[in-house]
Image (cartoon, rainbow, N blue to C red):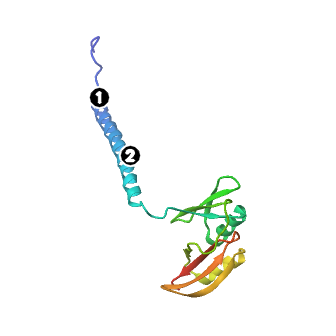
Amino acid sequence: MTLGAAPAVAPWMKTMRTVWIAVVLLVTASAFAQQEQKTVDNKANNGRIDYIEFPATDVAKTKAFYERVFGWKFTDYGPDYTSFEDGRIAGGFTKEGKAVRGGPLVVLYASDLAATEKKVRDAGGAITKDAFPFPGGRRFHFTDPSGNELAVWSEK
């Protein structure tokens, strides 16, 4: 090696450098593609119900009811608000406001209607309409500890 000349580079080092550049380019392209997909997905969800919020006279008690009966997972934001995810839709319970009858009815699905009705009763919910035939199956209505009326349906 002469003074001032570039050091010799082993052939495998050139290959590794090429592989490294390719990996960086792929990761960057993937990140841009994922961001583009999010934008497309958000546009596809435009106008769909995204979040449901319920009033709760006692947030902790209402949260415990839905955990026990339906297995919902919650994230607390202080004593007056908790959010949930049931696997399909997200929502929350807030201490603001109070339950009002006659509004839209949220209908939940259960694979076993009788078992779910028992869980509702055991967890302190009140059945407001016993199970009855419903297009596609059967359903019952209940109120949660905060007085919100919901229904549960099953095809059985």
Name the side, left or right, on which 14 lies relative to 142: left
Residue 94 point in image, percent of width and height: 65, 59
Mark before the other along the chain sequence, 1 or 2: 1
Within-10-Å neighbours for mark 1: few <14, some 14–19, many 20+: few
* Residue shown at 28% from the left, 12% from the top: 4
Within-10-Å neighbours for mark 2: few <14, some 14–19, many 20+: few
> As drawn, which residue projects farthest toward the bottom?
133
Name the side, left or right, on which 62 lies relative to 50: right
Mark 1–mark 2 distance (CA, rounded to whole Å):
32 Å
Q: Quadrant of residue 62?
A: bottom right
Image position of 101 with respect to 22: above or below: below
* Residue shown at 28% from the left, 22% from the top: 8
Residue 71 point in image, percent of width and height: 62, 68
**Residue assigned mark 2:** 31
- Residue type at tag 1: Ala
Q: Quadrant of residue 86?
A: bottom right
* SS category of the residue bearing label 2: helix
**Residue assigned mark 1:** 10
Q: Quadrant of the N terminus?
A: top left
Residue closer to the observer: 56 or 17:
56
Name the side, left or right, on which 130 lies relative to 38: right
Image position of 55 with respect to 126: above or below: above
Residue 23 point in image, percent of width and height: 34, 41
